[in-house]
Image (spheres, helix red, strand yellow):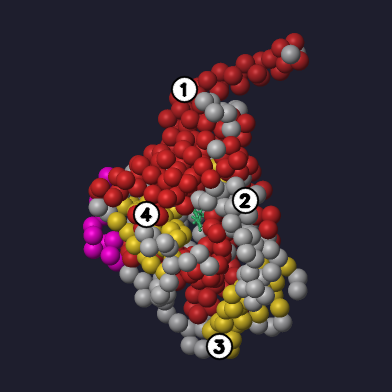
Amino acid sequence: MCGERFNPMARKAKIMTSRRMVLKIGGAAALVTILGCGAYLHGGGLGKALAPWSEAGTSFGDKRLDALAFAILAPNPHNRQPWRFTLSGDDKIIITCDLEKRLPATDPFDRQIIIGFGCLLELLEMAAAHMGVATKTVLFPEGQGEAHLDNRPIAEVVFLEAKKPMDNPLFDLVLERRTNRHVFEDKPIAADILAQLLQDQNIPENIHLGGTVAPENVASLIALARQGWQIEYETEATRRESIRLMRIGNRAVNENPDGISLGGIAMGAMGASGVLTPKALDRPGSFAFKASLNAYFRLIESARGFVFVTSKDNARTSQIEAGRAWLRLNLRAQDLGIGVQPLSQILQEFPQMAEPFEAVHTMFAPQGGVVQMLGRIGYGPKQDPSPRWPLRAKLYKA
Ligand SMILES: Cc1cc2nc3c(=O)[nH]c(=O)nc-3n(C[C@H](O)[C@H](O)[C@H](O)COP(=O)(O)O)c2cc1C
């Protein structure tokens, strides 16, 4: 009302409306593409949010910090980076969970959050070994919460005296490791490449790593993953949890370098013009809502294979092991030039997801185990790194 009467505002509104129309018409396909593969395609302007990727490898004056600078680059659900580090004495790191960073709607039992900690611990130990430091990790030294995490430590890691630096070819790939959110090419993955991807000497007895590139299996999993995504996005609580964590435009990402970062100039413009806003994304039937749904469908449909990690039980320690296995798999994929992206929807434990959850467990864990991770694989364009909080933001005083 005020804008209509006040001339300059009305003009601005008009310009915005026509810009919005252009973006809507010309940008419809673009939005689907950007939301899908470009969600993490930031281009320039994200120096601050991406700085931790270049800080790893520099010296912080304490080997624990040097190793942590790599560890914080671990994959983790919704990029929440839920870790808190307390340096204790001269040689110990106490790792706890920032309980505010959990994902209660999509991860009601903190299972995925713990898997992320498994990825972090694996990277931390790899980095220490690379520096010639042996580590001793004790998981849940004060016991573990039952259904939910609490303030007790997830792990204590002691840095022991120096030994000979250990060569680990996987460690060389840490700074290149990505979750790939591009549409994959129409190019099959050979069975022997899949076998290499799944080859892991460090898999413990209670964890199994599997995968498939068989067209009939891939087609079934695509259908299930589609169903799962539709359920997650059409369920208010789970959709809102993700929307709340969206950072739209470079400024938002730099200010809050976690969650689902939709950085880049195009994203910023769509946010500013009102096409891509939390409100629009949350309105079933809206352009943004449909674009978001379709963008992820496109990613799912381009899967050329699937990989999964199962565990015999659902103990917290098994979830940690699953995370460790996922991190190594992600690094091997990087080495083989294969893109990998977790598709976790159908593994999520909220009631609406029960049907595809059962189906994927019947497929991969018929003896009663738990499918801890599921991801699509394929060949695709290189992925930009995702944002991170700087290490100092994660350090707490003893
Ligand atoms: C337990 C777990 C579940 C995840 N689930 C998904 C998922 O469903 N979809 C997705 O695109 N990425 C998923 N990811 C990947 C994270 O979003 C990703 O690691 C994070 O955004 C950081 O990006 P990066 O791995 O490229 O560093 C998952 C990661 C973990 C550890």
Name which of mark 3 and mark 2 comes first in the sequence. 2
- In the rendered image, residue 195 lying in the magenta stretch gets the answer yes
Q: Where is residue 133 in the image (x, y as percent from the top left)?
A: 54, 83
Q: How many labels does the image show?
A: 4
Q: Distance between the Cα atoms at labels 3 and 1? A: 61 Å
Q: Which mark is residue 104?
A: 2
Q: Which mark is residue 162?
A: 3
Q: Which of marks 4 and 3 is in front?
A: 4
Name which of mark 2 and mark 1 comes first in the sequence. 1
Indicate left or right for 287 with 13 as reference.
left
Q: In which quarter of the image is the C terminus?
A: bottom right
Name which of mark 4 and mark 1 comes first in the sequence. 1
Q: Nearer the viewer, mark 4 or mark 1?
A: 4
Q: Residue 25 carries which label?
A: 1
**Kind of residue at badge 3:** Ala
**Kind of residue at badge 2:** Pro
Q: Distance between the Cα atoms at labels 4 and 1? A: 43 Å
